[in-house]
Image (cartoon, grey):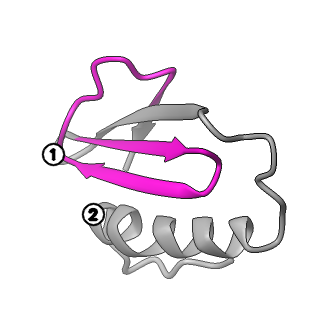
Amino acid sequence: MEVGEDVTVREYFEEHVPRIFKEQVSQVSSSGMEGTDFSVQFDISGAEKHTYGIIVKDAKELEVKIEGDLPFAMALGNLVS
C-alpha cells in the first residue's frame, strides 16, 4: 500500500494504520489469539517530536494512541520524519 508524500505523521497513524490493519486482519485467522496483547510505541522526531502508540488485542482489535506514551510498550521504534 502506498502512502502519498503529503500525508502527515498524524494522518498516517489516525487513518492509514487502522485501514492497513483492517485489510491485513481480514486476510488471516485470529483463531488461538484470544487473550493476547501487543503494543508498540513510536517516538518520532524531526521539526517536532511526537509519540504514537499502537495496541493490538486478540490479533483483531486495534487502538491507536495519539500523542501519548505507552507505559508498558512491548517494542519501541524511533523514527525521524
Q: For the residues marked 2 and 1, what is the alpha-carbon distance in whole angstroms?
A: 12 Å
**Could you say where residue 21 lies in the image, as x and y percent from the top left?**
60, 65
Quadrant for the N terminus in the image = bottom right
Residue 19: x %, y % from top left: 53, 76
User: What residue do we see at 51% from left, 20% from top?
Assistant: 74
The residues colored magenta run: 51-77
State the SS at label 1.
loop
Q: Position of residue 43 (x, y in %)?
A: 33, 33
Q: Amino acid at mark 1?
A: Glu
Q: Is residue 61 above or below residue 22?
A: above
Q: Which residue is mark 2?
A: 10
Q: Which residue is mark 1?
A: 48
Which sits in the foreground, 11 or 62? 62
Tag 2 near tag 1, CB within 8 Å? no
Residue at the spot 55% in from the left edge and 33% down from the top edge: 38
Three-letter residue code for mark 2 = Arg
Can you tell which mark lies on residue 75?
none
